[in-house]
Image (cartoon, helix red, strand yellow):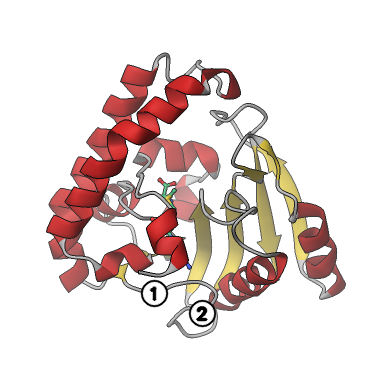
Amino acid sequence: MSFTLSKVVPWGRSYEEYISMFSLSPSELSKPILGCSDGPASFNSILNKQNGSIVSVDPLYSCTPEQIQKRIDETYNTVLEQTRENQNEFVWNHIATVEELGKIRMAAMNEFMKDYEKGKKEKRYINASLPQLPFRDKKFNIALCSHFLFLYSEQLTEKFHFESIKELCRVAKIVKIFPVLELGSVKSRHLEAIIKRLEKENFRVKLKKVAYEFQKGGNEMLEIAN
Ligand SMILES: C[S@@+](CC[C@H](N)C(=O)[O-])C[C@H]1O[C@@H](n2cnc3c(N)ncnc32)[C@H](O)[C@@H]1O
């Protein structure tokens, strides 16, 4: 198992959280979307049921349903325990307690698990890894990346981030990344350098406030257009 697949936890957010993290409009939801690093999130399953056009990529999709379920079961209590220990790093407004958080995340992951085999056959869940994606240029209107780039800044280099974001820009017209914090709820150590490097290559880069905030101070997404 690669470093990122073994160290990055399989943890899935809900459709509603995706809408809020990325401020997605009905018009954006009606065009082709790439969900990068979607893991066991329910965004793909729900959007597909609403007739949206969505493809998710994640190295997790090299696993069988049984293997994914086992990893979710193994990490679920640890993640909740760590959240409980670091409760002061989070904003408990939309989600009031650690128990409620567990219920919301498990419901999202159950939704994903029910859809996984069907979605794999329909090529909506594709086993691929940044910094290289198996798509033609500008296949998607938007590429979303939730809780992977920037979040694991301690583990993943600036070079990895830059190459990955450029690859996302190759396959989509607009790229949205949330959050721009790393673990521990501090701003990503790579953010400033990455923005400068992208602007130098004439990408239009904006930090945008969003309605979603769970990690304290984590209410901004990075939007890149080219
Ligand atoms: C914390 S989860 C986030 C899942 C989902 N996006 C969400 O917000 O609920 C991070 C995901 O990144 C995936 N990942 C790990 N290495 C990756 C890589 N090189 N390229 C793309 N995704 C990767 C992991 O498998 C995992 O599913």
Task: Give the x, y percent position of residue 147.
Answer: 51, 48
Task: Give the x, y percent position of residue 199.
Answer: 83, 67
CB of residue at label 2: within 8 Å of ligand 1?
Answer: no
Q: Amino acid at mark 2?
A: Gln
Are the residues flagged by discs 2 and 1 in contact, CB closer than 8 Å?
A: yes
CB of residue at label 1: within 8 Å of ligand 1?
Answer: yes
Considering only vertical position in the picture, is 124 above or below 147? below
Q: State which quarter of the image contains the C terminus.
A: bottom right
Q: Which residue is mark 2?
A: 132
Could you say which disc has been placed on residue 128 in the image? 1
Query: For numbered disc 2, what is the local secondary structure?
Result: loop
Considering only vertical position in the picture, is 138 above or below 196? below
Considering only vertical position in the picture, is 17 above or below 59? above
Task: Give the x, y percent position of residue 204.
Answer: 77, 63
Q: Residue at x 67, y 51 (%)?
A: 222
Query: For numbered disc 1, what is the local secondary structure?
Result: loop
The local crowd at label 1, few if under 14, some if 14 to 19, many if 20 or more residues have their Cα within 10 Å, is: some
